[in-house]
Amino acid sequence: MIHYNSDSRSFHLRTGNTSYIFSISETGHPNGLYYGPFLKTLELSENLLPREHLPYANQTVYSPAHSQRVLDTSRLEYSGPGKGDYRDPSCLPVYSNGDRNFDFIYKSHRIIPDKPALEGLPSASATAGNAEIATLELELEDALYQVRLTLSYTPLKDCDVICRNARFHNDSGSSVVLEKIMSATLDLELPGGWGVITLDGAWIRERHIHRRSINPGKTEVSSRKGASSSDHSPYIALCAPESTAKQGNIYGVSLLYSGNHSMAVEQSPHSLTRIQAGINPEGFRFVLEPGESFQTPEAALSFSQDGLNGLSVNFHNLINRHIINPRWQNNPRPVLVNNWEATYLDFTEKKLTTLAADAAAAGIELFVLDDGWFGKRDTDDNSLGDWFAHKKKLPDGLGHLADKIRSKGIEFGIWVEPEMISEDSELFRSHPQWMVHSPGRIPSPGRNQFFIDMVNPAVRDYLFEVLSEVFNEARVSYVKWDMNRNFSDIYSPLLSAEHQGEFAHRYILGLYDLLRRITDAFPDVLFEACAAGGNRFDMGMLAFMPQVWTSDNSDAGERLNIQEGTSMFAPASTMGAHVSDIPNHQTLRHTPIETRFNVAAFGVLGYELDFTTMKPFERKVIKKQVAFYKEHRLLLQFGKFYQLEHPETSNGTAWFVVSENRKVAILGVYQKLSKPNPPSLRILLDGINPDLIYEVTGRNQFMDIQDMGSLATRALPVKINPEGKVFETLADHYLYPLESFRTRAGGDELMQAGLCLPQRFHGGGFDNTVSITGDFASRLYLLKAV
């Protein structure tokens, strides 16, 4: 809802639980007044207006006619340089005479009963038939240079999110250069002690949660890699000092953009806190000719009084209801097997079909053929761009293989990396100018490959045609779209010298154009984004591809950190998560197969190991895992997700997902390292109905008795030499059941007193009630209302 008061020239934007209020000042600048919990009164209260009327001695006042107006101590909705605001500006235009000052003043506004799409960019969409959605467009103008700025606000009631973007219009007769233009600026008055949360990492350790204090000056996380990056996600949150996972005030901003970004927090000398989100200005220079305009990406702002869980639920609802393509909203994702870690580049058609048949026998629904199926791709230094079947590996073609895979009772999907080109490829030999490189320089390779120029519409046309041929020939139901390196040597021969600063953004616009065309042409194909794992996990990609390969690291121990950080903004239905072999190929860690599943189950489940060589024990366990996941798939993928407080904060994790009607839930409890003589655990649950009684049962889990060593002789009903062949054979086939667990309790009790878990193994003996929990042990518990 959007309410405008013409007397006070104020705007009150409401979502289900929040209010966002700003007004137009006497100088014509939009001034932020309030963003926080829902306020009942629509009319502007004098109490919200600032009471400082005398400027400090050394401050710059706005004008002689407004000698009490100081922009540097004002909460501005959008700011610029040159008129006394010395904080980071929202926009930096340079006019044809070299002037770098601007002063955008309110001209008009309109309220649109819809949410307009953004030109060339993904954005949240209005829910079909939702009459409550409206958009405020605020028109600002710098009359001196005849340029306009449109600030757009769309409050989304059902997810407590306000979507913002900006559009710069050049109505003058001369060119204007944009050196910076942010999607949103949010100025807040915050008391002391607040912190900032960012999601940071690197390849195979993406999106770790980092929390630190807000201090005077500027804190920024950004990407310069041409992708939203695994280094720093386009996400930032501000949290009150007392905030936890389940309580406390918290603001969050996430950017719907897949390229170079900047997310910044700045605390001024007068204790105002400014958040800015948008395209990274470093290396950005966009020229607007007369009559042209520039559209920023969309920023999603949210506030919650319910701590980190409340904020993450808001963003999850935004993604599931307004960003994911309606074709895939609440549509269960298939359980897949990917051949990569089973074969890497070395495979035959027979190997693939046998792997697919064995996976199908375990209940898996989709086979994904990864890298190595095209050109002459036997090593990773060639053939990118040659999207036709490898004649030696697939002599009868891709379509023939896909048909044989489907005959095993399993669907067929494929991996592609369209944004890359190899120097050793037919495509490069035919079109060397399509490879991104700086004239006269030897280009810097990444993973033995180079970018293809997505700025060039001829490149996008070629890729659309060749990919369409591949997808049609194989009749694919799934596509994994990869991108395995970062920008270097950026330059496009299609851009003149003065326009080269536009390359990074125009590349992303070109990518979005191709993604829109290809997903429109194949609406029933499930696309999964990938960029060396999670190097481009952002809301922009999710607008085209409803799930993302969360990380190239499938180690369950590290995935606890990665998936927990990712869950700060992304729901489980978007997170690709696989069970892989041990020792893990990224960390060399040995993790129980049940823990590998218990972590991957809180995402889109897949398997990435060799079914043709695994032991009968593993086959049996995996079949049970897949059956459990499919039975509870809608809950695990689309339920309301909570991070719970684990009593052993640094050594444990607890995840919880609850159905919409709050009658069914699944709890995951994870231990990192085992401890001698450990205490019992009690986990406080969240989000269930306090008035219902729940039956809690442990998922049936099993252990390879070889992991127990000689202790197995105490667990088995007969004495067997743990070093002998009989024991080895038994271990290959026997599913040793872990402890059984069943209890009943009220929802209020489970949330206030917690769920008391079984006693953990402590070295003093065990029976069928003791939880055998070694390093990286875990359990899942199912709750059902009775």
Image (tube, grey):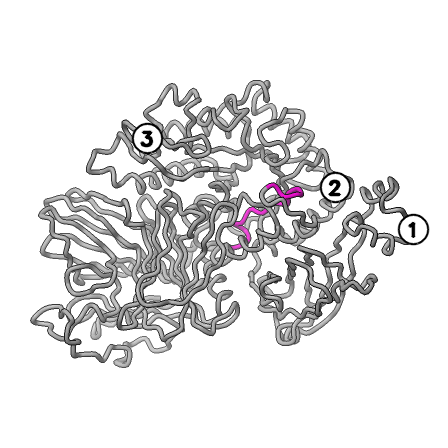
Going by the numbered disc 3, the residue's amino acid type is: His
**Residue denoted by label 1:** 719
Front position among marks 3 and 1: 1
On the rendered structure, is 785 left or right of 218?
right
Going by the numbered disc 1, the residue's amino acid type is: Lys
x, y (%) of residue 515? 41, 38
Crowding around mark 2 (Cα neighbors within 10 Å: few <14, some 14 to 19, many 20+) is many
**Residue denoted by label 3:** 437
On the rendered structure, is 322 left or right of 665?
left
x, y (%) of residue 501? 25, 41
User: Which residue is at 41% across, 63% downward?
Assistant: 237
User: Which residue is at 34% across, 62% downward?
Assistant: 265
x, y (%) of residue 726? 88, 41
> Where on the picture, by quarter, is residue 725?
top right
The first of marks 1 and 2 along the sequence is 2
**Residue denoted by label 2:** 619
Q: Secondary structure at mark 2?
A: helix
Residue toward you, 752 or 440: 440
